[in-house]
Image (cartoon, rainbow, N blue to C red):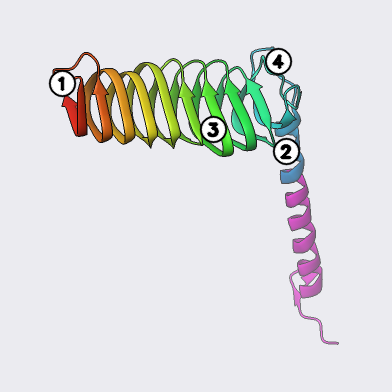
Amino acid sequence: MLEVAIGPLTITQMATKSALMRKITWCLAAASLAAFLLAAPTNASAQKPVNLSVFNPIQIVPEAESVAGLRLSLFHARNANVVGFDWVWLGFHQTTGNFTGVAFVGLAVNMVDGTMTGWQATLGNLAKGGMTGVQTGALNWNGGQSTGLQLGAVNIADEFTGLQLGLVNYTRRMKGVQIGLANIITEGPLPFMVIANAMF
């Protein structure tokens, strides 16, 4: 077999070294990722990048700690604060603090005790402290002040700025428009309207 030499190395030796370098690079990248995902926090309030859960308390990140990255579960997960992507197959996800990101839940409910910033796309969306963003689900409920879009069968908010689109829309005070079968703004000039209601 004819072997061409380029400098002190042959083509076969160069190819072998190149393949070895690729393997070393991939191994280092995998080791770095594993170390990042499994690294212990320096303090109890540190955020973890991933939480995998069957149901609380059978979850990687304890409920008193926060997640910044990805939270996945089969039936239930509970954490202090969550930033990132939140998914549960069937059941209930709870954030006892604030949530920022996207909550996509199958046949389940996503509840935030604090404020929600982002998008909740679940069967039931609850944000006790209010929300800024979008809620799409059968039931969307917010306490406090909320801004954005509620799209669902039943939309409920304490104070809302934006658009409520559903069969039943309810708020105490509003800067925006309601479109649906029953539209209620309890402190508005027209407390009840069919088809549409508004307050600015």
**Three-letter code for the amino acid on which mark 1 is drawn:** Leu
Q: Residue 78: x, y in percent? A: 64, 22
Q: CA distance from mark 2 to mark 1?
A: 60 Å
Dominant secondary structure of the magenta stretch? helix
**Three-letter code for the amino acid on which mark 2 is drawn:** Ser
| Mark seen at residue 179 | none
**Three-letter code for the amino acid on which mark 4 is drawn:** Thr
Q: Residue 72: x, y in percent? A: 65, 36
Res. 29 image quadrant:
top right
| N-terminal-most mark, 1 or 4 | 4
Q: Which residue is mark 4?
A: 42
| Mark seen at residue 32 | 2
Q: CA distance from mark 4 to mark 2?
A: 18 Å
| N-terminal-most mark, 2 or 3 | 2
Q: Residue 42: x, y in percent? A: 70, 15
SS assignment at label 2: helix
- Residue stretch rendered in magenta on the structure: 1-28
Q: Which residue does the image show at 50% across and 19% down from the upper left?
A: 98
Mark 2 vs mark 1: in front? 1
Mark 2 vs mark 3: in front? 3
Q: Which residue is mark 1?
A: 190
Mark 3 packing: few (<14 Cα in 10 Å), some, or many (20+)?
Answer: some
Mark 4 vs mark 3: in front? 3
Q: Which residue does the image show at 31% across and 28% down from the upper left?
A: 169
Q: Which residue is mark 3?
A: 84
Q: CA distance from mark 1 to mark 3?
A: 39 Å
Mark 4 packing: few (<14 Cα in 10 Å), some, or many (20+)?
Answer: few
SS assignment at label 1: loop
| N-terminal-most mark, 4 or 3 | 4
Q: Depth check: give the residue in front, 9 or 157.
A: 157
